[in-house]
Image: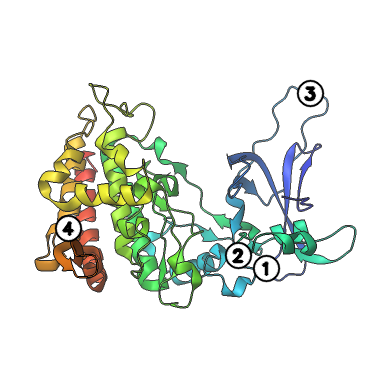
Amino acid sequence: LGYDPTTSYDYKLQCLVIQAVSSDNKEAKAFYSREVVICAERLFGRHTRCFKATADRPSPPDENDPRKPHEQMSCNIFIKDSWTEALENADEDGREEAKHLEKITDRLKDVTSVKGMYPELYEDCTSGRVRFTDPVSGRSHEDNSKTVLGDDVWGQLDKDTVLRAHKRIYTRGIGKPIKHIKSVPEFIIVAADIMRCHWEIVKRCDILHRDISVNNMLVRRNSNSEARGMLIDFDHSISINDKNDPTHAERTGTLQFMSISNLDKSELKPTALDDWESMLYILCWIGTFGWSSSTRANKTGDSGEPKQLDRWHMGTLKEIAKAKRADLDTYNAFQAITGEFNLGLKDIDLLFNLVEELRDMLIDKNSGKLAGALKKTSKQFNATTEAYENVVLSDPFEERVAKWEELSESLLTVLEDFAQKARERLGK
């Protein structure tokens, strides 16, 4: 959106140089990168760019032999640069990823069970909104769409125009996309790690992720080459107990993985159950379409008809929510989803049994008003319209909000039990 003097290309070193402010705000700190991991070069959106970087200045290439490969960098820093929707006052914005990561890094530093399963904020420099000194005016300002356009132009825009702020996050810990997972058991292990991490963050930090999707799940390998999960991207996270946060009511996520309450733009309090619902959808999606080109089944059946899951991302938001309610409502209805799993995947039975138990825990393990996924309605006569109308008596998802902590614990137990079965399948 504008000129950024904090990032430049050094032709002598043949790498990007990204300037950051030290954590004590006394001096600039340089990071060096030759690898752009993500580059969303679209006209609209967050324009996210991610870099693998190092704080160690690399040596320049050999001038006497230009064909000689340049020195390999040992990158241990991950830099995320993006233009995200924001409130003008950062102190009032509950979506400040840097603040969430600062809290998570501090409160989980001694929790060894989730070490390496979340991005740890790099402590030697300041993450958050980018500021720099204008080379013409000499004034220091925040880099956002309002300062780029200027007060006069900004003042002429529609009052609902969304402000975008330039943010840069520096973290430790680098993972790989889930396409690098090697088997169904590995995927289940990664999913269990991520939801264990998710639960520790909920309990210890009062932070709800709100955007569980395949793009925010990474895999890391330990010294024994075992797959472990990593949860990233806290752009849309909120503080659970901050009821005055205006971002609580925002709809966030990827359509096929969004919870029903999210799709319905419900006034219900967001809870961990929304993220658990998203994980259930992810597991179904992986079982049907795979996680990489080598495991991907066609998105149409043998007859050429669309898959049942296509209803989870096609149509209006209300139509998608209605389809998901119908698919989750009963055991028999859910069979239409699991019946399209890719049977060619080894150990697909493990994933099949897992999603059935997760759905059972989320939907059927309760009695009365909590059972099922469809709204309970009754036909009542409206004297004004002189016609019978469907009146909503209760919504199972609304009733479950009061039990979200108990249900979340139970769902995690189910997933971790299956992760142990997955390790046994792998002989570990």
Asked if residue 130 is positioned above or below residue 191 in the image, the reply reads below
Q: CA distance from mark 1 to mark 2?
A: 7 Å
- The answer to the question of whether label 4 and label 3 lie on touching residues, with beta carbons closer than 8 A, is no
Q: CA distance from mark 4 to mark 2?
A: 43 Å
Q: Judge by depth and name the residue closer to the eye, 349 or 375.
A: 375
Q: Quadrant of residue 338?
A: top left
x and y percent of residue 333 in the render? 14, 45
Q: Quadrant of residue 219?
A: top left
What residue did someone put label 2 on? 123
x and y percent of residue 194 in the render? 36, 54
Ranked by sequence position, the earlier of labels 3 and 1 is 1
Q: Judge by depth and name the residue closer to the eye, 222 or 298.
A: 298
- Residue at 35% across, 45% down: 256
Would you say 263 lies left or right of 347 here? Answer: right
Ranked by sequence position, the earlier of labels 2 and 3 is 3
**Res. 23 mark:** 1
**Res. 65 mark:** 3
Ranked by sequence position, the earlier of labels 4 and 2 is 2
Q: Nearer the viewer, mark 4 or mark 2?
A: 4
- Amino acid beneath label 4: Ile
- Amino acid beneath label 1: Ser
**Res. 259 mark:** none
**Res. 363 mark:** 4
